[in-house]
Image: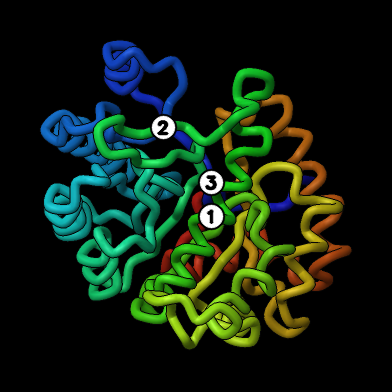
Amino acid sequence: MPLAKIDLHSHFVPDFYRDALLEAGIDKPDGTHLIPGNDENARHLTRRVNEYAADLKRRRPDKFGFFASLPLPDVKGSLEEIAHAIDTLNADGFTLMSNHHGHYPGDSIFDPVFDELNRRKAIVFIHPTTPCTAVPGEGCVQAAPLAHTYPRSTFEFFFDTARVYTNLFLKGTVSRCPEITFVVTHGGGCLPPLITRVSSVPAILKLPGLDSAVNPTFVKERLNSEQFFFDTAGWVFPDQIKGLLAYLEEKTKGKRMVYGSDIPWTPFGAVKTLSEDHDKYVGEFFPGEEESVGTGNAERLLKWKGRPGQA
């Protein structure tokens, strides 16, 4: 029998969102702020997406929760949406992108948003997207030189996960916002092998604007704390997980993991195979904690009393 799972990493595509993508000339989804500079459009689309998700949760609370979207890089609109999502829609948390038109979480322009998320003790799920650089007068210039040859999600997304968490640590957001709980996708992407290197930068280079508290010990302590969870979406088992486990302590590693399918961007057939791999290997890497990884950690994170069923 398959192990019970709560899926912390799945996507939904309402018809109106698909239509908005096509109208914006986008053939691949990339967030809810689709048109650079058009904050009104982003606010409207974000609100519709969040209302749609909230309705699913209202109708089937035994099956669904949701992370609300924000219309970043529009800070004012995002602050308004945080309040609406929590106070009216009963969102379980928030989903951000690894960059928003070339602006990366951790940049000072987003400080008001993260300060409010910290005040609200919010869960923040950051999904990777195409790496991008904000260039004055040119908008967002993609920094994915091999995108014409390979799908961006195959490896560019994993590099961008490393970028965004490097920025969040080095710019001091992680230190300043200890009440935010981060859900790191795809087992940390390309972040784990770079942790010692990037967390040594403040002490070695002493660059201005970097958090002097950040060092390898500090980062390891935070990753082992309740401030961080890692989902298993993608081909995390059996090899990629080993890089992450090098930074997780034996006593906490089983408490840091949650299941993720990445459906439907990961095709249904692959999701089935990956779910079977999860069930095959979870006991090997987290012996005795299979239930925690599948459901218990998600229940604790989301403060859910019931279980939404099996994946």
At label 3, which amino acid type do we have? His
How many residues crowd around disc 1 within 10 Å: few (fewer than 14), some, or many (20 or more)?
many
In this view, 272 is above or below 279: above
| 1 and 2 marks in contact (CB < 8 Å) | no
State the image coordinates of residue 27 (x, y, percent, origin top left).
44, 15
Label 1 or label 2, whichever comes before in sequence order: 2
Local SS, label 3: loop
In this view, 285 is above or below 218: above
At label 1, which amino acid type do we have? Arg
Q: Nearer the viewer, residue 241 or 256?
A: 241
Count of picture labels: 3
Label 1 or label 3, whichever comes before in sequence order: 3
Which residue matches tag 1?
A: 163
**Gap between marks 1 and 3, in whole Å?**
20 Å
> Nearer the viewer's eye, disc 1 or disc 2?
2
State the image coordinates of residue 76 (x, y, percent, origin top left).
12, 52
**Gap between marks 1 and 2, in whole Å?**
16 Å
Q: Nearer the viewer, residue 134 or 297?
A: 134
Instruction: Residue 141: give its label.
Output: 2
State the image coordinates of residue 240 (x, y, percent, origin top left).
79, 53
> Nearer the viewer's eye, disc 1 or disc 3?
1
Which residue matches tag 3?
A: 9
At 88% from the left and 63% from the top, the residue drawn is 284
Local SS, label 2: strand
